[in-house]
Image (spheres, grey):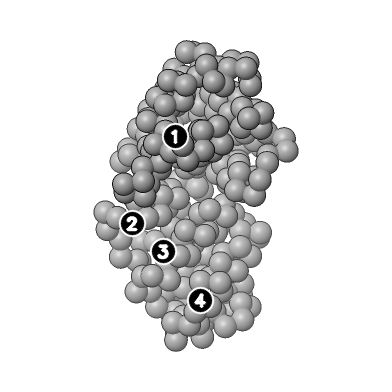
Amino acid sequence: MNTLIGQFTRFAVQNDLETDDWGMVATEFDVKDTLRDIDRFHASWNHSDDDKQANTTQFLREVTEEDEEKAVGVMERIYTLADTDSETLEKYPALEILENEEPGTEVLYSTFHSEQFLDIANVPGTFYPDLVEDINQCYSIGVNDATLILTRKLLENLLIDILRKQYGIQEIHLYYRPDNHRFQNFSTLIDNFEDNLSDFQHLSGGLDSDFIDQLNAFRQDANAEAHSIETNITEDEIESYREQARHASRILFRVKKNI
């Protein structure tokens, strides 16, 4: 949820929204009192002050603590009022879940889950714990497409960190493209990991051709959902993705730890 709120607030402050838009949406979702209690929210939006993103983040976090459905609904509604273009989701991929024909219905009527999508204990670092939490939050409220998109991001970043940790800048091309200052795409990362699989097999069990096939299958499925106009992931499908993601993430976390 932190990823969604962070990207959404950045998106919001860069759009031509008015203070009255927020007031209208807050009224629609019965969170006007919460909005009113945020110090300087209206002033910062009226005058385009530097703290308006911080105030918006505080508002959405407080709504989330009260009711996550409402928080996502507020963001979906504001999203429909903002100007978007083909580059919006490239800059803010977490906003993919707000691309609904009828704002709010996907969250309000989706299947909720009490268990976690990834039940990984002692996730290392600062980036990965937040990302795993966001994945589990999306899964818990039934936003399955965002769950897969964020899980793809998790596996992709784990491969980057593994290749970087193992080979350093001497083999930077395995995970990074210096010519355009971007990391390799997921498909290339998997290929490069497979080409050097023998360097990692002593670090964890389960590193074989079947594991690579599973990574590629998950990549393709997640890509298909990310670019689908209409998302309709069944419960059986999301449970299958869940097993794949758990298996892959546990192995990659183990490899990263043991390098």
- Classify residue 230 as left or right of residue 66: left
Cα distance, mark 1 to mark 3?
Answer: 35 Å
Q: CA distance from mark 3 to mark 2?
A: 8 Å
How many marks do you count on the picture? 4
Q: Is residue 61 left or right of residue 169?
A: right
**Which residue is painted at 66% across and 45% down in the image?**
125
Q: Position of residue 40 (x, y in %)?
A: 57, 83
Rendered residue at 54%/20% (across/down): 199
Q: CA distance from mark 4 to mark 3?
A: 12 Å
Q: CA distance from mark 1 to mark 4?
A: 43 Å
Q: Amino acid at mark 1?
A: Glu
In this figure, which residue is indicated by the disc labeled 4? 52
Tag 1 residue: 171
Return the residue nearer the eye: 91 or 119: 91
Other-residue count near label 4 (Cα within 10 Å), few / some / many at <14 / 14–19 / ≥20: many
Q: Position of residue 132 (x, y in %)?
A: 60, 41
- Distance from disc 4 to disc 2, alpha carbons, whole Å, reads 20 Å
**Which sits in the foreground, 107 or 160?**
160
> Which amino acid is tagged 4?
Lys
Secondary structure at badge 3 equals helix
**Mark 2 residue crowding within 10 angstroms, few (<14) / some (14–19) / many (20+):** few
**Under tag 1, what secondary structure?**
helix
Task: Point out residue 113 in the picture as x, y percentages from the top left corner.
Answer: 61, 36
The answer to whether marks 3 and 2 mark residues whose Cβ atoms lie closer than 8 Å is yes
Give the mark nearer the N terminus: 2 vs 1.
2
How far apart marks 2 and 1 lie (CA) works out to 33 Å
Q: Earlier in the sequence, mark 4 or mark 3?
A: 3
> In this figure, which residue is indicated by the disc labeled 2?
88
Q: Earlier in the sequence, mark 3 or mark 2?
A: 3
Looking at the rendered image, the quarter that the C terminus falls into is top right
